[in-house]
Amino acid sequence: MVADDPKTTSRRRYLFGCGVAGATIMAGCLGGDESSGAGTDTTNTSETTGSKSDGTSTETTETETSESGPYSVSMEPVGSVKFDSVPKSWVANNGSWADMGIALGLEPPKAVWLTSRYHTQYYDEIPGVSMDKSGMKNLYQDGVNKELFYQLDGDVHVIDPNFLMNRFKGWSQSDVDEVEKNIGPFFGNSIFSTGYKWHKDYTYYSLYEAFEKLAKVFKRTDRYEAFKSLHADFQSNLESVVPSKKSKRPSVAIMWANGNKPESFSPYLISEGTSFKQWRDLKVQDAFANTDVRDFHATRGEVDFETLLKIDPDVLLLRGHENQTKKEFQNTVVEFMKNHKIGKRLTAVKNDDVYRGGGLYQGPITNLVLTERAAKQVYDASGDLYDKKRVASIVKGDM
């Protein structure tokens, strides 16, 4: 089925700290539905599209059609996006969305923001699941070139357009409009962090709320439902791992550490963003929560060893080292801290409780891997906490 002429596509503006735009746009793509259906009946269903960070929710209306007809999926801030057929090719903002695509059994996205931060080695934990990112492009190459979007020619761009327009200079609403008119729509939300001021006026989705949205775009909600069930079982297994008493749960400091000999660190406060999901689920205590330290996403600030010593967290969780093995991390970063005149005085260093802190981005599969790893780090959990064979079966479409 050929998509609508983009010149007839209705336009709308994205958020700059104001209300959500909700006009429908048409996807400029060719694609085949996952299964061949014959009917064309259309039903309208009202659904909650997500919870804001203060616990409130917003309502939108989505249109679901038969397998062979046009359909619409809604997500803030882009509103309702109408697809004439199921997208075949796509571009993702980051590894969160890329991992959702793998979970849905899709071909990998043509590009992500930085391929170095899409840690496909996590799939090594699950026999039967793998992903080769060698042909994947970086969207960010000392800026984001609009021409690259033309080269990629994605049917849908799973990217929050506000991220493009606010994270660096160079993109405006007219650029977003041009890409949608000539290539394909944007459909995304920056879910990994709640620290961006430009995101405060529209919904943050949980990992599984966002996952469900993407599953609707690609008409693979059966896989979403299967993962949702598996995730519920996983959460039940975690209950036996997490101490019931808060006093038994460690205080953790999550930070970005540049290089193998860091003298300062970029701090993160545990928030509702998806990049902290494993730590929320494990109910650890945030060592920075009741201090003057502010989240890096909001201030771009840093902390040094002197500040860490005053706070003295039970556990240090360092991001930026996921491309190292556990042994490599211990032999470089941890060894440096053990020999640092101040670092060696930290409780976490003395007790060998300095770990890789996981990546910024996680989807349904990588969240399982990282949460199990985290449970073993902070609670000495043992054995499998989720069914790895089941994960592989769902990815393959064996529900």
Image (tube, rainbow, N blue to C red):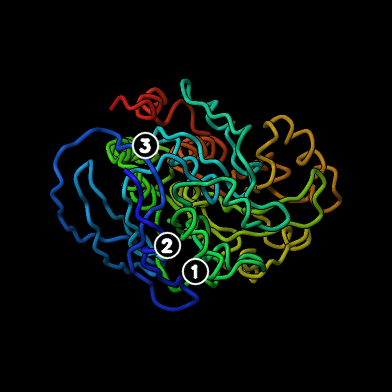
Q: Amino acid at mark 1?
A: His
* Disc 1/disc 2 C-alpha distance (Å): 8 Å
User: Residue 301: x percent and y percent?
Assistant: 71, 67
Q: Which mark is residue 234?
A: 3
Q: Residue furthest bottom?
A: 18
- Gap in angstroms between the C-alphas marked 3 and 2: 23 Å
Residue carrying label 1 = 199
Q: Give the CA distance from mark 3 to mark 1.
A: 30 Å
- Up the image or down, 122 lies above or below 215; here it is above
Let me know if residue 45 appears in the view. Answer: yes
Q: Secondary structure at mark 1?
A: helix
* In the foreground, 45 or 350: 45
> Which callout, 1 or 2, points at the residue further toward the start of the chain?
1
141 is higher (above) or lower (below) than 167: above
The residue lying at 79 percent from left, 46 percent from top is 259
Q: How many marks?
A: 3
Verify CB contact (< 8 Å) between mark 3 and mark 2.
no
